[in-house]
Image (cartoon, helix red, strand yellow):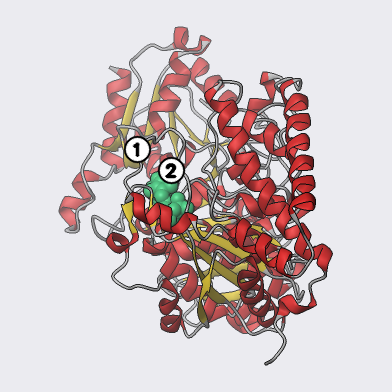
Amino acid sequence: MRNLELRAAIREALVQEMRRDETVHLFGEDVAYYGGILGVTKGMLEEFGPDRVMDTPISESGFAGMAVGAALMGLRPIIEMQFTGLITVAMDQLVNTGAKARYVHDGAMSVPMVVRSPHMMHGNAYMSQALEAWFTHIPGFKVVTPSTPADAKALMITSIRDPDPVLYVEHEDLYGVIGPVPEESEGAPLGRASIRREGSDVTVVAWLAMVPVADAAASELAAEGISVEVIDPRTLVPFDSERVLQSVRKTGRLVIVHEAVRRGGFGGEIAAMVAGSDAVSHLKAPIQRVANPGVPVPHAKGLNRAVLPDEDDVIAAVKRALD
Amino acid sequence: MTAAPHDSLTVEDLREMYRIMLLGRRFTERALELAWEKRLPVGLHPSAGQEAVGVGACYGLRPGDWVLPSLRTTEAFWTRGVTVLQMFNAVMGNSGSINSGKESFHHSGYPELGILAGTAMVGAQIPESVGVGWAMKMKKTDDVMVCFFGDGAAGRGDFHEGLNLAALLKVPVVFVCENNLYFQTVPGTVGQPIADIAERAAAYAMPGEVVDGQDVLAVYDAAQKAADRARAGGGPTLLECKTYRFMSHYPLMLEDSRPPEEVAHWKKRDPITILGRRLEEMGYQDAATARAVEDEILEEIERSFEKCAATPFADVSTAFANVYAEPLEDMGP
Ligand SMILES: Cc1ncc(C[n+]2csc(CCOP(=O)(O)OP(=O)(O)O)c2C)c(N)n1
Ligand SMILES: [Mg+2]
């Protein structure tokens, strides 16, 4: 199987789905002529033309609402939010017009749209936000958080074909990650976690760019004789609860890692799930959360690193769990 | 003089427009009485006084066209064929409601009648309507989308973003601003530094027109012209219908902040009376026939409410259905 960068894997999914289904449209700022500020949609305008790959004005709320209307009429719009911070500008259209349409029509209408939410965490306090937990809070939205090129492609295909609004989170730090990607793909089911590394002492749940960070931490810990299991849930809604519970029953220790702010982050939900299940009786140590402690993401490299979780933070948390 | 679109309406059409407006008025009045008697939830923003806008703008629509009503465009429902029983059921929220009680009537959609449920976020339907228009254009139909909103909504960023996108993409959308001179308790002069919201159309290189919103035929003419242009690929239009609500913003807001002289002045321009008089002048209606129409409406309202009152509420399991196309296997942590 050939190897692809994650960025190219996403593009391949977009291109293949647009070839397969002419109702798939892509719009957003700079996605057409320039090919996306982060280069994901390069070359797509040339193949599909300006109606299907469309540069919009700076109108996040406008084109998000437009996507909802188009989706209600049977198109399958994909919108790029450029950087996740910008999604704040479109929240009403996504959360209200979009996510509630199926419910208020009692199932008679569907909103098959994908919202691409690129996390760019080394930028500034405004753009660099990890807001996936907001969407896990909204009934009607699905939340997809791939970390490998193969998952990025397969889950994008599934997201496009899904009849409901999907927040598809991409991570700039992962765009250059290279891995095997099948040429043909019919997608992969949502709600299936992946065990990135098997282990027996501590379970680490991480998603997006925190997966390779957790994996690197696990490698280092392995050298010290500590066996870490790394679970990548791949999607937060739906969430593969059972896979996490099974692992916790086995290891008795849980560390959750995400770049989003700890307070109100999805890690709290996972901790509460474990605490409310039979797996709690297997816990040998308090659950650890590694996350942004609750500050805007700073610009300067050193400050930025101090706020966002890294390998050392994960190692320290695993050791606390083993104490 | 060139022929106006309404010249080709038949006597039956005019009588039907009159009937729908009167039905809207009588339904609102009765629904409010029932609400005070606690036999129906207080679930509507009264359209009384503004009936001509919804009827005029929707009367000429065809199957395949869509509308997005504002919180107050009750007449869009009537004109597109929603029945009195369906409306009562929607207000009640019982199992006969189109959405099984998930939303009240002004946020209800009737896909088979070309009505999308409007959100509760004033003005958010404007960008949404652009997307509907975009899909119509991509499917190469000659359908149109009619998007209703109030003057208050014209203060929203979504108004600007939506109209800008609509003009750029030349979508077949007719924007109908129901300018009733107030947004909730606040006069329009606090919301807009200009007298006519229609003027803003120029900023989007789109036709804009001020319309007498109390004259159903004037609204019909303007809407038909805008729809014809949209169907022919000419893009969107902004119609501003000057109108006035005869009741308070919401029934529970008992105090009316508006000057009584102003209210009295506008009540002299009742859209139902205006069309009724025209029908009389043309010899199509007299006191007796008007009475017969009214009696039939009142009877239908009573009959429908009885049926509504006898309709059970949906099973509570309904509350949990249709959040997603397929229920989530794992609801998550
Ligand atoms: C975005 C938003 N802000 C505030 C409200 C509360 N609200 C409901 S109706 C209304 C007034 C709307 O005025 P207008 O658009 O002129 O319509 P009208 O009620 O006059 O028909 C307000 C402020 C809302 N529903 N949505
Ligand atoms: Mg108003």
What is the chain identity of the residue bearing mark 1? B
Relative to A302, is A132 above or below? above
- Mark 1 or mark 2: which comes first in sequence? 2
The kind of residue on which mark 2 rests is Ser
Relative to A191, is A126 above or below? below
What is the chain identity of the residue bearing mark 2? B
Q: Residue furthest front?
A: B287
- Quick check: can you spot residue A84? no
Crowd class of label 1 (few under 14; some 14 to 19; many from 20; radius 10 Å) = few
SS at mark 1? loop
Q: Looking at the picture, how far across and down is residue B114, in whole percent?
A: 73, 56
Which residue is rendered at x = 19% and y = 57% of the image? A301
Classify the position of the N terminus of chain A by image quarter: bottom right
Relative to A156, is B144 above or below? below
Q: Is mark 1 within 8 Å of ligand 1?
A: no
Which residue is rendered at x = 61% and y = 73% of the image? B218
Q: Looking at the picture, how far across and down is residue B219, in whole percent?
A: 61, 70
What's the CA distance linking mark 1 and mark 2?
8 Å
Crowd class of label 2 (few under 14; some 14 to 19; many from 20; radius 10 Å) = some
Relative to B80, is A224 above or below? above
Please tell me the numbered disc located at residue B248: 2
SS at mark 2? loop
Which residue is rendered at x = 75% and y = 24% of the image? B306
Q: Residue furthest bottom?
A: B1
Q: Which residue is mark 1?
A: B255
Pick the residue in front: A26 or B159: B159
Position of residue B22 in the picture relative to residue B83 (left or right): left
Badge 1 vs badge 2, beta-carbon distance below 8 Å: yes
